[in-house]
Image (spheres, rainbow, N blue to C red):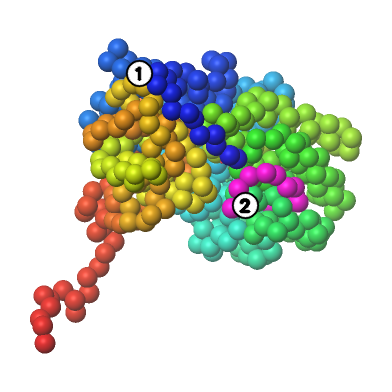
Amino acid sequence: MTSTSLPASDNLGSRRYLASLQADSNAAPNQHLLPLTATVTATDHLAIGGCDVVALVEQFGSPLYILDDHTLRTACRQYQQSFERFYPGQALVLYASKAWSCLALCAIVAAEGLGVDVVSAGELMTAIEAGVNAEKIYFHGNNKAYAELELALEVGCRVVVDNWLELKTLGEMATHQGKVVPILVRITPGIECHTHEYIRTGHLDSKFGFDPDQIESVFEFLATQPQLHCLGVHAHIGSQIFELNPHVDLGGVMAGWLVTAQRYGLTLTELDVGGGLGIRYTESDDPPSIEAWVKAVCDSVIAACQAEQIPLPRLLCEPGRSLIGPACVTAYRVGSQKEVPGLRTYVAVDGGMSDNPRPITYQSVYRALVANRMSEPLTETVTLAGKHCESGDILIQSAPLPALRAEDVVTIAATGAYNYSMASNYNRVPRPAAVLVKDGEAHLIIRRETLQDLLRQDCLPETLSRPFESP
Ligand SMILES: *Cc1c(COP(=O)(O)O)cnc(C)c1O
């Protein structure tokens, strides 16, 4: 994915820039740069969910994650309605909660009828506490701890088994507890797709899942383990994918696995194609709509099952980024600036790699707007830097913006996925608050960390607790 650097134009303000970045109003949330409710107020401020972004920062502080209820729910509904249309009555959409796991988000997606996929005891507990039905929770992970498997058995969620160690351990645990455990088997499909190397998981050299060579022996083993009820197969090929073909190919490959299972007397009824649909971070990103993606997946599974003459399985998918990514923006306050003559101007904000590690981790490109002066011409191209003690802590290399002043509220778009969930306390910076905005009201969904929170886990052994004396 490459980014085009925008020419600084003297009368293209954030307002028009915003308009040029928004797809047409019929487009899916994942094709928009900003939340669907984004508008400009009479005072020339950016508003989301009917709330003035500048006022939100005054009330809740900065940096601030601002999550738009409407955009998230619209994305959920587009997934649900598309499946209803192309695969009636037999689909389940799971929110991949690693994109952003918190109580409010799990509660919203559950209220929309979605299930949740989790990859740790922490994410599992969050989903359970939020009231997600255990039958709609799918537990992934390539190295689940024994205690995590125990928790899975206790709450009764589905376990997506990743490897032999887990399969055998789970088999023994189920026998020991006299339980029948519903599982899926994760298999690496061997499908290449064009995305960042770290977020590609479908090719054969991946740490996740059984190798296709192992499928027969896994099914053979499962045929002897009635306490492990194998519901189906799972695959996930990667993230931020803009092509439909990898998922079309995947449908065919996975239907083949159902046929293989039949040969071992196993009737698998679920096929989980994972997540991966991309979103728009910049004007050069052009992902397919949610509906187009769902249609491609359904068509391919239906065609493959017809060709194999097997009944249609229940179809599951696990979107993370495309559900939550476009629904959130992060608002920062501008602080210091540094001009390197002839090279660039650094403008620093009061957050950075601790609240958004994607630019430094994946070289991800974002776009920013000045929320308090939306009509101001974008006359500058600046480097938007974070406040961390790391030269690589740059949020945006080349951001077309008006000349910035201290206290301006700079807002970065499409920060819902893999921002809060990957946030850290690097440099002992407290993690930001998050608010949910809807119809002009804002509700705190994550409290800002305090300095006391940062010290909460620290222990000072008795031997260190005396003031140090010089020898
Ligand atoms: C990360 C992941 C997802 C979600 O991926 P997105 O690209 O955010 O849609 C779904 N399933 C599994 C197993 C994952 O690891």
Q: Is residue 265 visible?
A: no
Q: Is residue 367 above or below residue 238?
A: above
Mark 1 or mark 2: whose residue is earlier in sequence: 2
Q: Position of residue 243 (x, y in %)?
A: 69, 35
User: Toward which corner of the image does residue 268 lie, by quadrant?
Assistant: top right
Give the overall secondary structure of the magenta segment. loop
Amino acid type, residue under disc 2 in the picture: Glu
**Numbered disc 2: secondary structure:** helix
Front one among 124 and 246: 246
Amino acid type, residue under disc 1 in the picture: Ser
Mark 2: give few (<14), some (14-19) or many (20+) Cα within 10 Å: few
- Left or right: residue 12 versus residue 364 is left
The CB of the residue at mark 1 lies under 8 Å from ligand 1: no
- Residue 194 is a magenta residue: yes
Front one among 337 and 343: 343
Question: What residue do we see at 60% from left, 62% from top?
Answer: 173
Question: What residue do we see at 57% from left, 31% from top?
Answer: 284
- Residue 359 is a magenta residue: no
Q: Which residues are magenta?
A: 186-198
User: Toward which corner of the image does residue 246 lie, by quadrant?
Assistant: top right
Q: Is residue 132 above or below residue 265?
A: above
Residue designated by label 2: 197
Question: What residue do we see at 54% from left, 34% from top?
Answer: 4
Marks 1 and 2 close (CB-CB < 8 Å): no
Q: Quadrant of ligand 1?
A: top right
Q: Is residue 122 visible?
A: yes
Residue designated by label 1: 375
The mark total stands at: 2
**Numbered disc 1: secondary structure:** loop
